[in-house]
Image: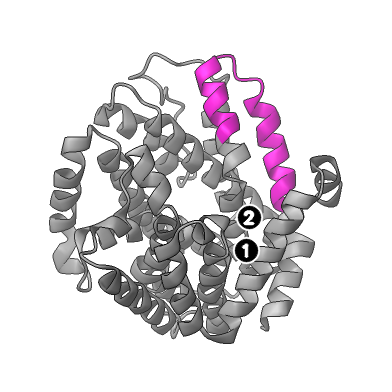
Amino acid sequence: MMPITLMSRVYRKIIPAVHQELAYWKSRAEKIPNQELRNQALASIEHKTFHCEGGGILALTAKGDYQKAVKFIVAYQTISDYLDNLCDRSTSLDPADFTALHESMSDALLLQAEEKNYYRLRDDQDDDGYLHDLSETCRSVLRELDHYDFIKDYLQELCRYYCDLQVNKHVVKEERVPRLKNWFNYYQDKLPEMEWYEFSACSGSTLGIFCLVSYAMREDFQLEDARNIRKGYFPYIQGLHILLDYFIDQEEDIIGGDLNFCTYYNSEETLFKRLKHFVNEADRHTEFLPHKKFHQLINRGLLGIYLSDAKVRKQKNVRKLARGIIKSGGWISYFFYFNGLAYRSLQKSIPAIITRSFTK
């Protein structure tokens, strides 16, 4: 698949489907009775639409069932972004509360789950079933899969990494790094050589889950494909995804006092070298993936789209490193880079009402 073919399908199929799903969840969020929960649900949709658009690209691997895959991806990513907001805004910083909230993510990957109160350890409670319905929407899609048994264990494994990360990185500041280091030590002997903050980055992506679910909708999906996707996406493709996310947010996170994994490298040179290492390993780990050229385009797309963000241009040192990373990714990275610039420019210049008409 050529880059221009990929982006054509993204704009014609994926973006409209994503925005249709988000419009539904926004209308649900607007009806949440509790003001704090309503505010955080709406903010997560308004400010993190990009996450659903990016993750939605993997729905193309589901072929004719891409809309069903988008339905799962948007619901699951909306849970992720909503809970991230709730944890960020938490005043208790209680790990037990964060664990209870994130049960909704592991429950979303089962075929059946008993209804429970995910807010049981916090004061804000009444969401009129919003979080449960997001989780149930994911389950409703999974129940239609013929190959769920091939992916169920890998889904829970990747979810466990993600949820553990979210709990550990949102506790009181002085406990965050010690907890993350101890968590890394538990898994270190099963991982390729990396630092604790790189493992954290690898755990913070939902791309592997989206890829597994989308592929499991195909008639030709095999158990070996599930194994290869798990090994292909975790750790390196997921790690590249989240390291790029943190890379462009460095200044913002420093000002906000938030944890940023890119700030733990001892020099810009080391950061650059390790980012290039993740790019190379992400490419190498596409070798055994079904449709490996598609996944190589995903890697180049991550580079181009993240590094075309306006935040990069506002940070001198980040801008300098970004140029080198894009250059190392070749002409395809440049294609996605300029595509990202054009798409963001279009989003800013077209009034919201016109944008909505495009995505119906």
Using the image, tell me which numbered label, if any, was put on residue 57: 1
Question: Which residue carries the number 2 mark?
Answer: 53
Residue 173, placed above or below residue 207: above
Q: Is residue 127 left or right of residue 325?
A: right
Element type where label 2 sits in the image? helix
* Residue 123, horizontal then vertical, whole percent: 39, 13
Q: Main secondary structure of the magenta part?
A: helix
Nearer-the-camera pick, 20 or 104: 20
At label 2, which amino acid type do we have? Glu
Q: Is residue 244 left or right of residue 144?
A: left
Q: Is residue 3 left or right of residue 167?
A: right
Residue 108, placed above or below residue 126: below
* Residue sitting at x 50%, y 60%: 312
- Magenta range: 17-43
Q: Are marks 1 and 2 in contact (CB under 8 Å)?
A: yes
At label 1, which amino acid type do we have? Ile
